[in-house]
Image (tube, helix red, strand yellow):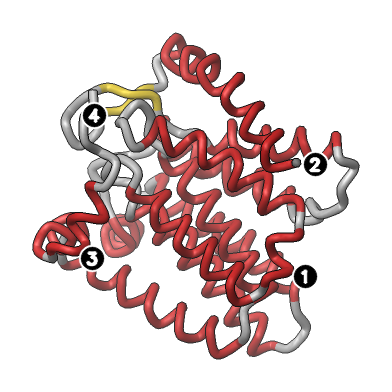
Amino acid sequence: MIMLLSMFLTIILLPFYIIFLKRLGKVEKNYKEELIPTSFGIFILFIEWLLLILQQQKEFFYFWALFLITMIGTYDDYYGDKKVKGFKGHFSAFRQGVITSGFIKAVGVSIVALFLSFQLAKDPFVIGSNFFLIVMLSNTMNLFDLRPGRALKVYFVLFLLLGVQAPRFFQQELPLIQIGILIIVFFYDIRAKIMLGDGGANLLGFQLGVWYSIHFPLYGKLFMIILLIGINIYNERHSISQFIEQHKWLRVIDRLGQKGIG
């Protein structure tokens, strides 16, 4: 029921939010050089907060963290330096005395993730694994937000994987609320009508990181951390989009649903 309600609210409110962003001039060029509204973290978080309040749920003990992550990502969307890319670029700029918005985001996300990791566990090793998992998922989700629907396809796979590993995950209100929102958002994203932006992608990655920290076994977390680090290292040296294009089955999945964009 709560999932259907989140879908209904998104269907009603998302078109108005898109108009709102366009009127504010909050648009960005996509890979086709088309100007489209970007940064939907605030919208996603608002719907989540509204429904949790209406349901009188207490699942949002870490909502302060989600709010901060969304604000940091949204700031980077609208005021960030787009010329500097990747961890290497931002930290190289810092060593030269230039503090980029990406560097601020990396530090901000790390601080929030560290505080939250201490709330989720007491064992130092588990705290460390939770911290790296949250940080790496938050950044990695952003790396996939380069083509219509790509980041959300990755999100859906990880969401389902977590549900298979921990079925009780699907019994909680917040995951059901979020998946309802994103099903509707996906139909706009896949048609290149919107971009999640850093505000949206970082929020979703961070939230997945928290859920995986709570529900996933330690060996699974360690495997994911290694995989995510590998993806980020690869992205520093190569293009994820080119990698996908070079592998037929990935290319088919990536383009699935994009037919007739326009």
* Sequence-first disc among 3 and 4: 3
Residue topped by disc 3: 236
Q: Residues within 10 Å of mark 4 (few under 14, many from 20)?
A: few
Say which label, 2 or 3, has the lower sequence index: 2
- Crowdedness of circle 1 by 10 Å Cα count: few (<14), some, many (20+)? few
Q: Is residue 15 left or right of residue 141?
A: right
Q: Is residue 115 above or below residue 195?
A: below
Task: Tell me the element at label 3.
Answer: helix
- Residue 194 in which image quadrant: top left
Numbered label attached to residue 74:
none
The extreme left residue here reads 246
Quadrant housing the C terminus: top left
Query: Which kind of residue does numbered mark 1 sit on?
Result: Gln
State the SS at label 1: helix
Do labels 2 and 3 touch, CB within 8 Å? no
For the point 26% across and 43% down, the residue is 147
Q: Which residue is mark 1?
A: 119
Q: Which residue is mark 2?
A: 52
The Cα atoms of the two marked residues, 1 and 2, are separated by 21 Å
Quarter occupied by residue 38: top left
Q: Amino acid at mark 4?
A: Ile
Point 40% across, 82% down: residue: 226
Mark 4 and mark 2: Cα distance apart in space: 34 Å
Q: Nearer the viewer, mark 2 or mark 3?
A: 2
